[in-house]
Image: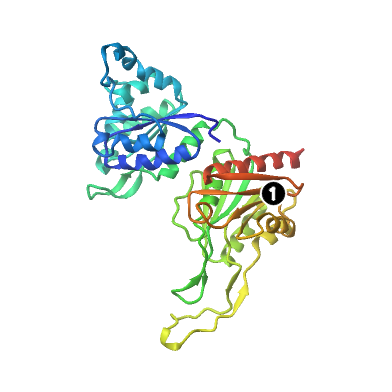
C-alpha cells in the first residue's frame, strides 16, 4: 500500500506530542518510511529516542545540529535534502505557533524551514487549548493553509489537559494515519461504487445486563470503510457496538443485535454495488430474554438458544451483479472451512482469518487467506488492518471491472 513512500513527521510542542509515538508506529506498520522532526518544545514532552526507536531513523531536533567544522555545510542544508526526499509532510500535533509560522512562511527552526522547501502534500493535525483553537488568528491561518491545499485533520472535542472542555484535542491517531493514506493515494478506482460494510460484533441479550457476544473490535470493518471512501466510493457502514470514530465521508448506522444488523443491511442492500460483510455476527441468541436481571440466588438459568438471521446467506441470495465479500474466522481447517463458506453463502471472495496469536480479534494487525470462486488463494501475511483493507479492495475493484465488462 505504501509503495515505499516516505513521510516527514513533524512534532511540535504540546501535551499531545506523546501521541506522535502512536502515529509513528501506525505509519511504520503501514510500510511508510518515517523521518521525525521535533521542535525544541516537543522534546520537553517526548524524547527523541522514543521516535527514533519506532521509526528506525535519527530524529532531527535542530536546524544546526552539533557538528564539526567540516560537517557544518551538510547540517545547514539538511532541511532541503530531507524535504526533497519526503513524499508527504505531516505535523501532529500542530500547535497554534506552527500553524502561524506555516501560514506566514516563517522559517526559524528545522520544521518550519523544511516546510518552505517541501512541495508535496501537507497534512496538519492541530491540537491546542479550546480558546486558542477558536481564536480569529488561528481560524484565519487555517483558512489560508487550506486554500493552499493543506489537509486539516480537525481536533476532537472533550476534556483537555488544561481542564477546558471543548474542541482542541488531537484527533485519533488512526484517523491521522488514514489522512496520510488518503493524501498519498493516487487513484479513485471505486468512484461511482456504493460499498456497504458491516463491522464489529453483535450483542444478543440474556437480560438487561448480560448478553452473548464475541471479541470483535470492528477495526477491520472500519478500516475497509475508511479505505473504500478514500478510493472514491459512497460508503454505508453498519456498525455493531464498538467505540471507534466514524471514518470520514462514511454514513454510519449503529446497531446492537444480529436482528438489527440484518434489518439495516437489507434496508440498504439495493443501493450497494459492493457488500463487505466483515462483522462478527453472533450465530445464536437466547430464545427468550428476561425483562429483569437474573439473580444468582435463583440458581443457574437454563438458556435455550436459537439461530440468528444469516445475513451473509441472505445477501448471497440477493446479490445479483454485486460483489459480495465474506469473512471467516477459524481456529482450525482455515482454507477448507473458508472455501465451504465461500460456496455455501454465495460470496465472490472470502477472507479467512486464523483466530489467536498477535493478529485477528481486538488487535491492530491481521493475516489470513483471500479465496475466490475461481479457486485462487492469496496469502495475506501479517500486516496492519489498514493495509489488509487495501489488499481486499484491490481484489474488489478488479472483480467490479470484470462484472462491468
Which residue sits at x=32%, y=12%? 73
Which quarter shows the N terminus?
top right
- Label 1 packing within 10 angstroms: few (<14), some (14-19), many (20+): many
Which quarter shows the C terminus?
top right
**In the displayed image of the protein, which residue is found farthest to the bottom?**
298
Closer to the camera in the image, 7 or 98: 7
Which residue sits at x=24%, y=49%? 164
In this rendering, position of residue 126 left or right of residue 33: left
Q: Which residue is mark 1?
A: 371
Which residue sits at x=27%, y=38%? 14
In this rendering, position of residue 362 left or right of residue 17: right
Which residue sits at x=57%, y=50%? 236
Position of residue 116 relative to residue 218, above or below, is above
Closer to the camera in the image, 47 or 124: 47
Q: Is residue 277 visible?
A: no
* Horizontal and vertical percent position of residue 94: 33, 34
Say what secondary structure mark 1 lies in: strand
Position of residue 96 relative to residue 295, above or below, is above
Amino acid at each position: 500500500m505504501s509503495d515505499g513512500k516516505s513521510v516527514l513527521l513533524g512534532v511540535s510542542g504540546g501535551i499531545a506530542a506523546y501521541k506522535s509515538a502512536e502515529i509513528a508506529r501506525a505509519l511504520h506498520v503501514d510500510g511508510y518510511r518515517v523521518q521525525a522532526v521535533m521542535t525544541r518544545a516537543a522534546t520537553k514532552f517526548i524524547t527523541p529516542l522514543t521516535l527514533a526507536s519506532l521509526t528506525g531513523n535519527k530524529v532531527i531536533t535542530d536546524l544546526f545540529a552539533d557538528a564539526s567544522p567540516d560537517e557544518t555545510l551538510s547540517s545547514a542544508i539538511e532541511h532541503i535534502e530531507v524535504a526533497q526526499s519526503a513524499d508527504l509532510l505531516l505535523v501532529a500535533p500542530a500547535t497554534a505557533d506552527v500553524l502561524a509560522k506555516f501560514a506566514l512562511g516563517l522559517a526559524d527552526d528545522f520544521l518550519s524551514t523544511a516546510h518552505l522547501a517541501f512541495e508535496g502534500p501537507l497534512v496538519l493535525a492541530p491540537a491546542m487549548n479550546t480558546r486558542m483553537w477558536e481564536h480569529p488568528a488561528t481560524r484565519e491561518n487555517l483558512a489560508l493553509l487550506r486554500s493552499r491545499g493543506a489537509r486539516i485533520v480537525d481536533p476532537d472535542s472533550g476534556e483537555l489537559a488544561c481542564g477546558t472542555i471543548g474542541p482542541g484535542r488531537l484527533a485519533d491517531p488512526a484517523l491521522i494515519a488514514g489522512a496520510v493514506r488518503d493524501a498519498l493515494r493516487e487513484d479513485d478506482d471505486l468512484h461511482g461504487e456504493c460499498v456497504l460494510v458491516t463491522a464489529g460484533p453483535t450483542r444478543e441479550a440474556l437480560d438487561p445486563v448480560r448478553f452473548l457476544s464475541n471479541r470483535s473490535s470492528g477495526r477491520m470493518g472500519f478500516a475497509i470503510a475508511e479505505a473504500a471512501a478514500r478510493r472514491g466510493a459512497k460508503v454505508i457502514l453498519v456498525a455493531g457496538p464498538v467505540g471507534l470514530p466514524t471514518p470520514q465521508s462514511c454514513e454510519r448506522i449503529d446497531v446492537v443485535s444480529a436482528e438489527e444488523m440484518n434489518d439495516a443491511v437489507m434496508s440498504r442492500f439495493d443501493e450497494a454495488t459492493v457488500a463487505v460483510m466483515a462483522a462478527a455476527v453472533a450465530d445464536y441468541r437466547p430464545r427468550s430474554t428476561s425483562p429483569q436481571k437474573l439473580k444468582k440466588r435463583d440458581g443457574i438459568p437454563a438458556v435455550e438458544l436459537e439461530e440468528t438471521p444469516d445475513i451473509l446467506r441472505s445477501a448471497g441470495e440477493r446479490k445479483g451483479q454485486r460483489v459480495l465479500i465474506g469473512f471467516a474466522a477459524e481456529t482450525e481447517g482455515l482454507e477448507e472451512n473458508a472455501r465451504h463458506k465461500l460456496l455455501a453463502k454465495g460470496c465472490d471472495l472470502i477472507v479467512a482469518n486464523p483466530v489467536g496469536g498477535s493478529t485477528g480479534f481486538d488487535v491492530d494487525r491481521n493475516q489470513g487467506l483471500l479465496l475466490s470462486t475461481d479457486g485462487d488463494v492469496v496469502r495475506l501475511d501479517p500486516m496492519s488492518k489498514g493495509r489488509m483493507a487495501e489488499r481486499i479492495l484491490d481484489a474488489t475493484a478488479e472483480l467490479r471491472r470484470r462484472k462491468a465488462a
